[in-house]
Image (spheres, coloured by chain):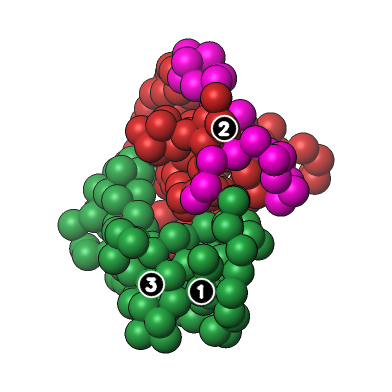
Chain colours: A green, B red
Amino acid sequence: MTDIIVTNLETVPGRQIIKHLGIVQGNTVRAKHVGRDIMAGLKNIVGGGLRGYTELLTDAREEATQRMMGEALDKGANAVLNVRFSTSSITAGASELYAYGTAVVVE
Amino acid sequence: MGGLITFFVLLLIGLIFGSMNERNHFKRLRIAEEELSHIKVFNIKTLPDNLETGGALVSGNVVVAVDYFKVIAAFFKMVFGGQLRSFESLMERGRREAVVRMQREAEALGADAIYNARLEFSAIGQQPQKIGGAELLAYGTAVKIKS
């Protein structure tokens, strides 16, 4: 998976785009487990960073990106351009992480 | 009565530890920003000509929580309206931390600059009684400059 270029620019520096393959996307919905919720609740008294949630969201975003890259590889792309991330809360306990971009073939 | 005591204890803990946390965090941020100042961050898409081929997506995120004192302070402020300074500093801390983490990732890749940097926000925990926090995400494309 490392041979695919992922960028949020509209071009790859120093390379020409040969073919556009259309939009590719990846998503994942994650819920936090109760232990983390309790810890976060305690942290809410003193404030500051919530490490558990930060890790959870990093992992989830990584997975969404991996799925997007998987789809791009299936289409025969070697780069994904103009990647965007978005997050939405579905219910109080869960959020969806979504990554999308345009799969292209570059020289 | 017991409820009132708990309330004031929580308020006090929030005030003391919250402001201590905040001061320390700002201090850490200043040091980190100084260290990483060689990695320039741009939010423009137009690239200069002197870049090496290729680029990599880098990101940094952080979830910040409000402390109890801030929640109560904000509650009173909302009655009269006006600036919620305690929340302003929270968002500032979160954003700067996210950018610093993004720069760290770029540094690990040996990059010189980040182009098309974006900052995104999402609220975590819908009910006001429960966990009030916010995730701040910074992402962009790390590139190397030809020497």
At label 1, the amino acid type is Val
Q: Chain of mark 3?
A: A
> For mark 2, what is the residue?
B145
Q: Do callouts 1 and 3 point to residues on the same chain? A: yes
Left/right of residue B125 with respect to residue B88 in the rendered view: left
Say few, some or many: other residues with alpha carbon within 10 Å of mark 2 (under 14 / 14 to 19 / 20 or more). few
Looking at the picture, how far across and down is residue A32, in whole percent?
28, 64
Disc ID at residue A69: 3
Q: CA distance from mark 1 to mark 2?
A: 23 Å
Q: Residue at x 44, y 27 (%)?
A: B18
Which corner quadrant holds the C terminus of chain B?
Answer: top right
Q: CA distance from mark 1 to mark 3?
A: 13 Å
Q: Find out whether the residues at labels 1 and 2 contact each other: C-beta distance under 8 Å.
A: no
Q: Do callouts 2 and 3 point to residues on the same chain? A: no
Seen in the picture, residue A35 relative to B140 is either above or below; the reply is below
Determine the secondary structure under disc 2: loop
Which corner quadrant holds the N terminus of chain B?
Answer: top left
Q: Comparing marks 2 and 3, which lies closer to the viewer? A: 2
At label 3, the amino acid type is Met
- Specify start and end residues of the magenta stretch as a single range: B29-54
Most extreme residue toward the front, as rendered? A107
Determine the secondary structure under disc 1: strand
> For mark 1, what is the residue?
A105
